[in-house]
Image: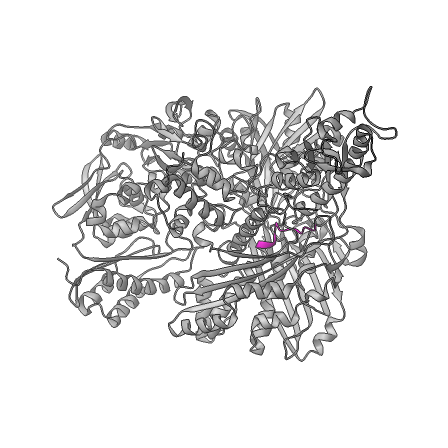
């Protein structure tokens, strides 16, 4: 698609930057609407309790308050948040044994509170200050119930039940298998079993959530501005809740200050705020503060894996069994989405003939668990990459060597992994060279042999260096669809809109590059509209590393149709055949006849309906097409992460000496932006490995309620990164692109854990739980010294 | 005297007068009363640095100051960095050229914190830059490009570029 | 998170400030740098009825060297001290500590008096006050008094200041020229409060250590001097064995806390490690013969 002089493949600087650098960006907190009211919530201080009464009389009478509502008030008025926002296709449901009960989350709870921070009442006032003052006057009587704060405990027979009507805390279970893992394990020459725990942490964007809404009585229309990644989902659910046709509800996202998945589903506030705006007849806005964010915006990860691997003396994997539990917290907004991702990505780049995976989802009295950059993949990769390192250690082989022996090779592509993906299609790794990526990354740190020499020398001087690998494959560009509208504007510029919702990825720039190539115009002549339901009727949104893949394909197909029409009109004007025409420089011209051309602006005008138009007979008016691209299935990115760390054996402090990423996301639209995505994701992964942790005590009280306690990595915590690129274009979409948004965050916990274990190999300690904090390292070392397990 | 207090201050060279409750945070005053929304609120407890502004020439976190404390002060916010003719400050330009921003939410705080540091140390090493920008949290970039941008911006500033 | 309403006062003199504190009988808080107080108020963990802002009182930030001491006005900004040559020359341990205190933007506003009066167990400046045997001037309705460091820090976030007393000055004995000094801090990220920190000043005379000062932060409820450990160095010198013994004694002396950042055991372990490292670093930095 991209020829010499094309824009795809070039590191164009971003058009988004100017406004963001000069303070002219517009985030939902910056929106000014006349007579706007502000919201604060009354939130539960207990993790699990029955609500005996909620008295808002004093709150409602407080200065500046327009409205105070409880869950009981709302119950009559509004249905709950829908229970399956992320639907599973029937192809999947017929193939995978599963059962899911997703309790429906009310917009404000009425009967019980199920996590600390759950919203009990809403206050609307003339300032956030006044709303908080009023919220403090709410009198809530709760009858405490025992809290469940551990997934295994939640599934024990005598556990307190969190969703009474379900009579169980098991919200979901599924299993998927390939071959006969049971027999294969039984017959394997060697076996290893381990438990791995990848802990609860979170996306923590610097901008918290926020929703503003405005009701227009003249048109009976609601406009919702939400810091969301899924404007069409919000519009769909809001329309249902408000009893309005979708045509009367508009949802748009302005500039969004990071999402990473936490803004990737519909929250109760997305629906409550528009309801309040309509009820009050004034614009209403809620801006989440950081403390609230930790108390009510989705957390993630929190998976416990029981893994058993069967292998031979050469380290070849014969069978793998993984039974895992996800602690999904009090609600389960996206259902099977994350857990099944874990199962689908577990085998990774390795040939595993016999595989059995089961996943269970347990509800606990914590904040709900949903997708965050990686969305189930980091957990799978942590288990797989740790256990393959343990296979190597058991056999006295290099971890890199064991990986190479098991990796699917380039000449084996496309490779059928033997189980279905979340979309119900068989997993087929379509392209790539995994061994080469691993080798590249290892070469970039100087090679394993040189490292082992350095490691030995270091140990003699009391230095503990370790090398760790984390390798993952990632299904990207998942369906069900994404759309693009392409239209030739009367000005001659090319307009493109899509349901993609950026939160910093640079999509305005990326899509301008793609359209510029498609139409032979300059990127400056491409007008991009994103994250607005008014700009395209149907959309899916930006989650799951999918927007470049799906939107580029939709743009491609929509453009093809518009081009056909444009050529038909141009042929009419230039009195030639469409086959004689080509796109050139903002217009359409006759091949080989310079000067015989007509501008896109002229074509737009000629294509108009009415008198004296320039269309040939049979060609409908307008130069616009909307195409919804339905991906055949996902396309597979991958990367090798190699980390060299140094562990201080006296304090347990881990310093990252070198970090290399060898990455393949197919055709790269903008190398600069791709590297930015990888760097950002990797930093989050490093944070998840070493620093970030959501903590709860035995009563379900959140221990990490601010950024003082939830440790986001600073620049001082993130090493320099070296990036290497491979390009195996995807055969599954016109541009050959693969998704890159999440990948960086998937491998670091595994790579760093492996590196730490390698550094401390002399002590014979393992780290199979994250985060790997200095104190935990020192505890393990001490236990090992004392012979305590 | 929780009654509103009068405040006079200079922001980006312009004199402003306002009135607010003593408890109103400076960042809220800047954003709401002065309409300068470029300074962002990321945490409201003085950790993330998104709210960083220059107060009398030195970087300060405006979410942990009361507006009344800025009475008589000279503030610079991100809106005051570009040149009068609209061209970008060399540091802004460097951020642009090095892709040192993605979502842009931490960027105003990052620019101000970096500028403050460059006044003290106009020729920083990479490690010094890394430590200086540890004052502001970024979730998008992994800091890699921000460090490059500050290095390049510092060079451009030393070379006297406008 | 927004603070509750409060009455706001911005007195022009210390005595006015004291009178205001007296009037509110413990329900008023003093506002210095605000870097600790304002976040607590935003979380509504602190809900004072009144705020007495000290920032307009002139001359509370003077730095003076006299009679072998360095006196620093309580409202001197941490940043100001960081870049004042006199501090680097006469109190290099304080200069070193300041670079561990938060980040440059918090040091812009944070004050030395505020940090000491706030008395966070994990703060570096109180540790230095202990290490250098400094004292503070406190003024209240009953007049002025000096409080020495060991008597000042009572419990976490609690000093010996009465409800209407204001800390006006901090005084340190100037460090002997050529004294070795070091701070070893363990925190999860640089700029965070210390999980454990040790501050050391050493005065040498050849192989002898004539003065050893060791103080802690983050390890116990208040910053403490490790006098027994100091004695070991002063009696036995600065060789590896003596230093190791002092480090071990330090670990025995401390009364660490367990909180969600670290356990008492880990803190105790770090005490030993950091003491050894800090003493060795101070030894190597200082002059062999200190004047």
- Residue at (70, 36) in percent of width and height: A584
In the rendered view, tell whether residue C266 sits above or below residue A255. Answer: below
Q: Is residue A184 visible?
A: yes
Side of A775 where C246 appears, left or right:
left
Residues shaded magenta:
A736-744
Q: In this rendered view, identify the residue nearer to me: C58 or A787.
A: C58
Tell me the quarter of the picture where residue C274 sits.
bottom left
In the rendered view, tell whether residue A526 sits above or below residue A692. Answer: above
Q: Is residue A769 visible?
A: no
Residue found farthest to the right = A618
Q: In this rendered view, identify the residue nearer to me: A508 or A443.
A: A443
Residue found farthest to the front = A593
- Residue at (82, 20) in percent of width and height: A612
Side of B116 where A195 appears, left or right:
right
- Residue A650: x and y, percent? 38, 66
- Residue A581: x and y, percent? 78, 37
Q: Name the quarter where the C terminus of chain C is drawn.
A: bottom left
Tell me the quarter of the picture where residue A225 sits.
top right
In the rendered view, tell whether residue A653 sits above or below residue B97. Answer: below
Question: Is A743 within the magenta?
Answer: yes
Main secondary-structure element of the magenta-colored stretch: loop
Structure colour scheme: one colour
- Residue A401: x and y, percent? 59, 72
Question: Is A337 within the magenta?
Answer: no
In the rendered view, tell whether residue C232 sits above or below residue A497. Answer: below
Side of A45 where B70 appears, left or right:
left
Q: In this rendered view, identify the residue nearer to me: C56 or A226.
A: A226
Tell me the quarter of the picture where residue A211 sits.
top right
């Amino acid at each position: 698609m991209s020829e010499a002089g094309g824009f795809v493949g070039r590191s164009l600087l971003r058009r988004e930057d100017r406004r963001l650098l000069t303070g002219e960006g517009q985030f939902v907190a910056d929106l000014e609407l006349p007579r706007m009211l502000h919201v604060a919530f009354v939130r539960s201080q207990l993790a699990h309790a029955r609500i005996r009464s909620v008295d808002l009389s004093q709150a409602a009478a407080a200065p500046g308050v327009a409205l105070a509502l409880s869950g009981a008030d709302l119950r009559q008025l509004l249905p709950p948040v829908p229970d399956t926002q992320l639907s599973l296709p029937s192809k999947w449901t017929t193939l995978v044994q599963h059962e899911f009960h997703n309790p429906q989350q009310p917009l404000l709870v009425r009967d019980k509170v199920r996590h600390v921070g759950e919203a009990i009442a809403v206050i609307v006032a003339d300032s956030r200050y006044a709303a908080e003052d009023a919220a403090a006057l709410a009198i809530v009587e709760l009858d405490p119930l025992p809290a469940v704060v551990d997934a295994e405990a939640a599934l024990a027979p005598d556990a307190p039940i969190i969703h009474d009507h379900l009579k169980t805390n098991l919200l979901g279970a599924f299993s998927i298998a390939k071959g006969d893992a049971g027999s294969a394990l039984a017959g394997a020459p060697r076996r290893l079993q381990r438990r791995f725990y990848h802990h609860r942490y979170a996306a923590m964007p610097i901008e918290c959530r926020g929703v503003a809404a405005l009701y227009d009585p003249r048109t009976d229309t609601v406009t919702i501005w939400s810091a969301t990644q899924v404007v069409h989902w919000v519009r769909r659910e809001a329309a249902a809740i408000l009893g309005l046709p979708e045509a009367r509800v508009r949802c748009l996202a302005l500039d969004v200050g990071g999402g990473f998945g936490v803004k990737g589903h519909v929250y109760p506030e997305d629906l409550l705020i528009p309801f309040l705006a309509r009820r009050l007849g004034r614009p209403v806005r809620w801006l989440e503060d950081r403390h609230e964010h930790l108390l009510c915006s989705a957390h993630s990860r929190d998976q416990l894996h029981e893994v058993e691997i069967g292998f031979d003396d050469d380290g070849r994997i014969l069978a793998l069994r993984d039974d895992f539990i996800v602690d999904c917290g009090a609600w389960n907004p996206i259902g099977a989405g994350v857990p099944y991702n874990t199962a689908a990505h577990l085998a990774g780049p390795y040939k595993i003939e016999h595989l059995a995976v089961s996943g269970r989802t347990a509800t606990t009295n914590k904040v709900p668990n949903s997708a965050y950059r990686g969305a189930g993949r980091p957990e799978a990769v942590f288990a797989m990459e740790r256990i393959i390192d343990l296979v190597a250690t058991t056999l006295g082989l290099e971890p890199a060597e064991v990986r190479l022996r098991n990796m699917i090779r380039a000449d084996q592509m496309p490779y059928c992994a033997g189980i279905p993906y979340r979309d119900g299609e068989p997993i087929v790794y379509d392209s790539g060279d995994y061994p080469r990526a691993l080798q590249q990354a290892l070469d970039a740190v100087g090679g394993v042999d040189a490292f082992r020499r350095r490691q030995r020398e270091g140990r003699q001087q009391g230095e503990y260096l370790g090398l760790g690998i984390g390798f993952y494959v990632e299904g990207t560009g998942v369906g069900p669809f994404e759309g693009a509208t392409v239209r030739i504007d009367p000005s001659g510029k090319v307009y493109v809109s899509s349901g993609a919702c950026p939160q910093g990825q640079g999509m305005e720039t990326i899509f301008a590059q793609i359209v510029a190539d498609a139409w032979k115009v300059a990127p400056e002549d491409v007008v991009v509209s994103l994250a607005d339901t008014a700009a395209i009727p149907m959309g899916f949104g930006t989650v799951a590393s999918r927007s470049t893949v799906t939107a580029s394909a939709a743009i491609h197909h929509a453009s093809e149709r518009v081009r056909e029409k444009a050529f038909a009109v141009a042929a009419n004007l230039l009195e030639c055949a469409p086959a004689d025409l080509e796109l050139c420089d903002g217009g359409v011209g006759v091949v080989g006849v310079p000067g015989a051309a007509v501008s896109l602006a002229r074509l737009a005008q000629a294509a108009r309906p009415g008198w004296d138009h320039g269309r040939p007979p049979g060609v409908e008016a307008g130069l616009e097409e909307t195409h919804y691209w339905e991906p055949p299935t996902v396309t597979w990115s991958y990367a090798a992460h190699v980390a060299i760390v140094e562990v201080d054996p006296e304090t347990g402090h881990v310093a990252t000496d070198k970090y290399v990423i060898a990455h393949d996301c197919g055709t790269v639209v903008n190398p600069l932006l791709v590297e930015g995505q990888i760097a950002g994701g990797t930093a989050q992964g490093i944070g998840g490995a070493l620093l970030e942790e959501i903590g709860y005590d035995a009563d379900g009280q959140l221990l990490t309620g601010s950024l003082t306690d939830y440790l986001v990595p600073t620049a001082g915590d993130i090493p320099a990164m070296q990036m290497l690129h491979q390009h195996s274009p995807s055969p599954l979409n016109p541009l050959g692109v693969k998704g890159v948004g999440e990948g960086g965050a998937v491998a670091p916990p595994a790579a760093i854990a492996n590196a730490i274990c390698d550094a401390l190999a002399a002590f014979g300690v393992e780290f199979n739980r994250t985060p790997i904090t200095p104190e935990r390292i020192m505890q393990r070392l001490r236990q090992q010294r004392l012979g305590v397990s | 005297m929780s009654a509103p207090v009068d405040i006079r201050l200079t922001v980006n060279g312009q004199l402003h007068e306002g009135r607010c409750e003593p408890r109103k945070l400076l960042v809220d005053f800047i954003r709401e009363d002065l309409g300068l929304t470029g300074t962002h609120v990321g945490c409201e407890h003085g950790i993330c640095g998104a709210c960083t502004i220059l107060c009398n020439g030195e970087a300060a976190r405006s979410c942990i100051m009361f507006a009344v404390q800025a009475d008589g002060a000279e503030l610079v916010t991100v809106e005051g960095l570009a040149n009068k003719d609209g061209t970008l400050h060399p540091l802004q330009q460097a951020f642009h050229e090095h892709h040192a921003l993605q979502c842009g939410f931490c960027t105003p705080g990052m620019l101000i914190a970096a500028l403050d540091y460059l006044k003290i140390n106009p020729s920083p090493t990479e490690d010094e830059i890394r430590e200086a920008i540890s004052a502001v949290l970024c979730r998008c970039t992994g800091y890699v490009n921000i460090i490059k941008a500050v290095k390049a911006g510092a060079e451009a500033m030393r070379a006297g570029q406008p | 998170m927004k603070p509750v309403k409060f009455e706001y006062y911005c007195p022009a003199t210390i005595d006015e400030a004291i009178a205001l504190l007296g009037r509110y009988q413990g329900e008023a808080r003093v506002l210095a740098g605000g870097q600790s107080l304002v976040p607590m108020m935003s979380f509504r963990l602190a809900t004072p009825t009144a705020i007495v802002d000290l920032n307009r009182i002139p001359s509370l930030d003077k730095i003076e060297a006299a009679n072998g001491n360095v006196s620093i006005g309580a409202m001197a900004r941490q940043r100001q001290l960081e870049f004042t040559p006199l501090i680097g020359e006469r109190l290099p341990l304080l200069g070193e500590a300041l670079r561990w205190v938060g980040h440059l933007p918090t040091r812009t506003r944070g004050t030395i008096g505020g940090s000491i009066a706030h008395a966070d167990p994990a703060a570096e400046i109180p540790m230095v006050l202990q290490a250098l045997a400094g004292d503070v001037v406190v003024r209240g309705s009953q007049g002025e008094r000096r409080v020495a460091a060991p008597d000042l820090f009572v419990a976490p976030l609690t000093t010996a200041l009465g409800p209407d007393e204001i800390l006006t000055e901090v005084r340190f004995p100037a460090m002997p020229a050529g004294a070795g000094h070091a701070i070893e801090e363990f925190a999860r990220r640089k700029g965070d409060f210390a999980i454990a920190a040790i501050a050391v000043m050493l005065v040498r005379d050849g192989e002898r250590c004539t003065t050893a000062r060791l103080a802690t932060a983050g390890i116990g409820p208040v910053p403490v001097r490790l006098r027994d450990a100091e004695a070991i160095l002063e009696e036995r010198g600065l060789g590896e064995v003596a230093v190791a013994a002092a480090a071990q004694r330090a670990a025995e002396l401390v009364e660490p806390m367990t909180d969600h950042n670290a356990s008492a055991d880990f803190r105790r372990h770090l005490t030993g490690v950091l003491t050894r490292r800090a003493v060795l670093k101070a030894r190597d930095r200082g002059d062999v013969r200190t004047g």
